[in-house]
Amino acid sequence: MARRARNYFLEQQQGSSELKQWQFGIVQGATFADLRRESAHQLLEINFSGYAVGGLAVGEPHEVTCEMTAEVTALLPQDRLRYLMGVGKPEQIAEYVSLGVDMMDCVLPTRAARHACLYTSEGRVLIKNARYAEDQNPIDPHCKCSVCRRYTRAYLRHLFAVGEFTAAILATHHNVHFYLDIMRQIREAIGFGNLAKFSSEMRAKYAAGPA
Ligand SMILES: [Zn+2]
């Protein structure tokens, strides 16, 4: 099936000077290392532009997600993008990068935002909590997003309390900015050789507090 998809994709691209899309092969195999390896080998023969690791973070323990990811990234060529599908929590992003992952996607920042859970450099802020009712600080004093520059925690909390839809929009804007900033900090940490330190700092900040 992957080969058919690849052939069809390449046929469509033929003669087109505008090569706009990349096609990724998705490595499957659940939590069986041997099946993962076999899947990776077969997809490598087809020669995709990039490779994804699929079927993980679907309820298995985090250690198993990491174990399977490492198993696969060890086999994938370094000059092709590696995409881990459907992850992850803020404290896990740097860990996945250290396992050789370049790209991720996740509903978490937007879904959490709609449920009034904001990610900050100091951990999660559940903005509906009464303690923020008079809080004149931004969501995250270290965040440079337009929401943190303009609005207070008290205002955000008020919007959620009265069911104003703008609350979800503003919270989503902040959380997405926060995730992009994690990736920026990871690139910086890699440049300075500090990725392991950054990863353990993120885990410490997010280990305590609300889920
Ligand atoms: Zn912000």
Image (cartoon, helix red, strand yellow):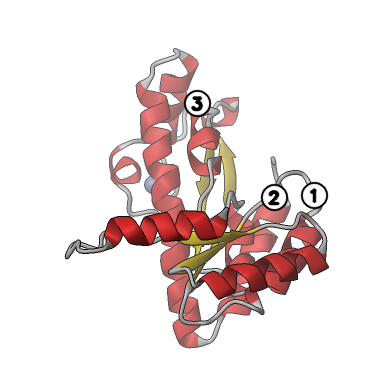
**Residue 67: quarter of image:** bottom right
Q: Which residue is mark 1?
A: 60
User: Label 1: how many residues lie within 10 Å, few (<14), some (14-19) or many (20+)?
Assistant: few
**Is the CB of the residue bearing disc 2 within 8 angstroms of ligand 1?**
no
Q: Name the amino acid, label 2.
A: Ala
**Disc 3 on helix, strand or loop?**
loop
Percent across and percent down for residue 107 are: 53, 40
Closer to viewer: mark 3 or mark 2: 2
- The answer to whether the beta carbon of the residue marked 1 is less than 8 Å from any atom of ligand 1 is no
Which residue is nearer to you in this view: 147 or 62? 62
Tag 3 residue = 133
Residue 155 visible (yes or no): no
Please state if 7 lies on the left or on the right of 57 as rendered: left
Q: Amino acid at mark 1?
A: Glu
10 Å crowding of disc 3: few (<14), some (14-19), many (20+): some
Give the image location of residue 133, x and y in percent: 50, 26
Q: Is residue 63 above or below residue 108?
A: below
- Tell me, yes or no, whether the two marked residues, 1 and 2, touch with CB atoms within 8 Å: yes
Question: Is 170 located above or below residue 57 in the figure?
Answer: above
The first of marks 3 and 1 along the sequence is 1
Instruction: Describe the element under mark 1 as helix, strand or loop.
Output: loop
Residue 57's label in the rendered image is: 2
- Image position, residue 6 (x, y; %): 46, 60
Image quarter for residue 15? bottom left
Q: Residue at x 49, y 81 (%)?
A: 190
Q: Would you say residue 65 is visible in this rendering?
A: yes
The residue closer to the viewer here, 188 or 10, is 10
For the C terminus, give its image quadrant. Answer: top right
